[in-house]
Image (cartoon, coloured by chain):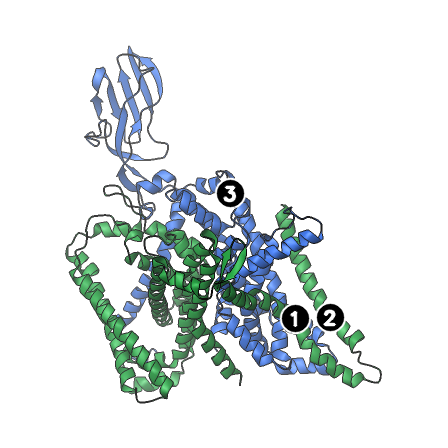
Amino acid sequence: MENIAGKKPALVWVVHVSVGLLVLLWIIPTLGLLVSSFRSGDQIVSSGWWKALFTQEQQLSPIRLAGQEAERDGMFVVEGQLFTTASTVSAWGTSSRDPAVNEPGQTVGLADGQTLAVNADGTFILTSPVTTEGTRLPRVFTTASTPPEFTLNNYRTVLFSPLAGQSIFQAFMNTATVAIPATIIPILIAAFAAYALAWMDFKGRALLIAAIVGLLVVPLQLALIPLLQLHNGVASTLNGWFGLEGTNALQGKGYLGIWLAHTGFGLPLAIYLLRNYMVGLPRDIIENAKVDGATDFQIFTKIILPLSFPALASFAIFQFLWTWNDLLVALVFLGTSNDQQVLTGNIVNLMGSRGGDWEILSASAFVSIAVPLAVFFSMQRFLVRGLLSGSVK
Amino acid sequence: MTQALLAFLTIVVGVAGCLGYFWASNLLLDKVLFPARGPNAGQNINRANLLRPWLFLFPAVVALGLYLAYPVFATLWLSLNRNQSGELVFVGLDNYRTMFGEAKFRESLRNNMVWLIVVPAASTAFGLLAAQLTDRIRWGNLAKSMIFMPMAISFVGASVIWKLIYDTREAGQPQIGLLNALWMQADGGFFSILILKVLPVVLLVGIAAGILWFLWAQIRDFADGGIWGKVLRGLGVLVGAWLVFVALSWAWGAATAMLPYGKPQFWLQIPFWNNFFLMAVLIWLQTGFAMVILSAALRGVPEETVEAAILDGANPFQIFFKIKVPQIMGTIVVVWTTITITVLKVFDIVRAMTGGQQETQVLANYMYEKLFVAVDWGVGSASAMIILLLVSPILVWNVYSARKEMR
């Protein structure tokens, strides 16, 4: 095909370059956050993340000298190291007006007869005619090149020692608690319904399918208040039955509520996807089984379910991604207090309260993105298949 | 720990309950209610088979009815009532009147319209471009995977990612937001004029030309089709003409604007244009979806049609726009409508990035604020009904085409 089109090589290069640009444009945003999450807060604000990948030369913030003092030949000498990480000094100075006036290795006289030398590797020697104990040592301005340096501290902080009420680990557990049952439960319900809609003949089938296609696009925003009312009503009625009036033994908001809500919201897509798939299964297998005396229940569990595995998997991925990433349903049905918060809600709060703390925000965001990304890359095949069977026919 | 146990228990109970329900109800039907033996065996089997589909459907129908169908009517009812200290008082269309009187609502309606035009169009266009280009190269699958990846990222996660790009530091400090870092490179020289003036003008004029071409096709074929076709075409022409006007006036604006070179910009605080910075996030998220589906559709285009076009001397652009695109028009419409629905429900991005401030309000966030911040159920439900109203043409169209397909 390409050959008979007689394509010019130039055009092929254009294609390669444009795809390259497009891919770059699409991964750079994520890459930026990923790189930032491995940098310390100081590093993040002192240079753009794109510079973090290379050795960079820049003027560092002033460092106050500190070190052990020793007496040598009647002079008091302080020796030490400026940096905690390996950096190379290219220029230094002791005043903010002239921060790069001296070369590394040069010895410079300061006020009060002190002298200071800073070497390229960051070691310094300060000599003073009187003891420096109890006085503040001078500050040093340096221009230094620092090799790329990354840290896992941000992740350690957000996962294991968060500020009160911002525990990402707790939120992670909450999210998993919401997402996993909310993925598994609708599948079974939908599979039975899809089988009936695909392989059983009854009055009103076409109408039911049309209704499901319609419900597919009904915005779940409509359901929030009525369902919250319903949940609260059911909870207080049950409290009444068990003689728990006035207490909050059973609440309208909680995991049970959000599982049911996600199940309800996920069903139309589940039924639609599974029915489309099951209709395509070979008729012979099912009819043979019927002739052999299998009941519908047996046909369903022994033949249809195993054969529909790809469709089940693709819906499971959709539903998992959707429930894991959801914000609105969790805010409404689970509540906003700290021990109930899911990852997305937690991050929105962080953006509000600590919007400038990129080291916290980026690590938290990546904790929340990691699981869906892992699912995405390991099961991409099923995801694509599901998308195609849902939209293209 | 208790909640993990609870979750595990729920899975077990849910799955076992489901299977148990289906197994027991089938057993009940076959052995107790209509046993397939005795004098009425034949009749009983028929009756059982008449009932069985409903056994299979029962849990799904109940869940759908309770969680999706009933709320539509309940919300409609709530939108016609006012909540006065716990009592619902019927007020007719009062809530809608109040809502349309609010500047914030009109703002979110306007913003939603812009979202509805820009996001589906841009995502579909980028998706089509990516699909067409990646199909021709060896590392196309890898490229597709990378462009598709944002699909797995939550809207909130994407908001964090893009907020870093839009970050602003004062002039003189190092910019850590990519966009400002690039912006500070612009100095009014040759390249900044090329990228910030010439390129937008060319793009906007190109879009205007594309729409004009579409308009011309509509006007040319105006005589064809029934009365509804004419109405639709007329509407399309009006909207298109307006879009051409907007695109050209923007092009004029881009050409004449005095850009504040050298000053770091607060991208999310520039009125009106900040909406576009929010839309970029959704476009970034949705392009992969469009690309995957359109790429499958492009592969389904029969080879013969392309070969015939090549033999007739068509160039690659003609092959793409005149042979391939018309053949996948149905899929493009599906992609477009699916993204349109996503756009109508967009909530997380606005909530996380601007909270609807600085003229970026959209309907879904307006509704959330009315329902849960202002606790005004009447107006909140009314705005939810507006969202449903905007979705309903797509709903009707989907049902219509699904029914047509099943015949």
Q: What's the colour of chain A in the image?
A: blue
Q: Rate crowding at label 3 as few (under 14), some (14 to 19) or many (20 or more) other CA atoms within 10 Å.
A: many
- Is residue B352 in view? yes
Which residue occupies 33% across, 89% down?
Answer: B224
Pinpoint residue B223: horizontal percent, then vertical percent: 30, 89
The amino acid marked with disc number 2 is: Ser
User: For the residues marked 1 and 2, what is the alpha-carbon distance in whole angstroms?
Assistant: 11 Å
Q: Rate crowding at label 1 as few (under 14), some (14 to 19) or many (20 or more) other CA atoms within 10 Å.
A: some
Along the viewing direction, whichever of A163 and A363 lies nearer the viewer: A163
Which residue in the protein does label 2 denote? Answer: B25
- Report the chain holding disc 3: A
Tag 3's secondary structure? loop
- Residue B58's label in the rendered image is 1
Q: Is residue A292 left or right of residue A131?
A: right
The amino acid marked with disc number 1 is: Phe
Pinpoint residue A112: horizontal percent, then vertical percent: 22, 15
Along the viewing direction, whichever of B347 and A182 lies nearer the viewer: B347
Q: Are marks 3 and 1 on the same chain?
A: no
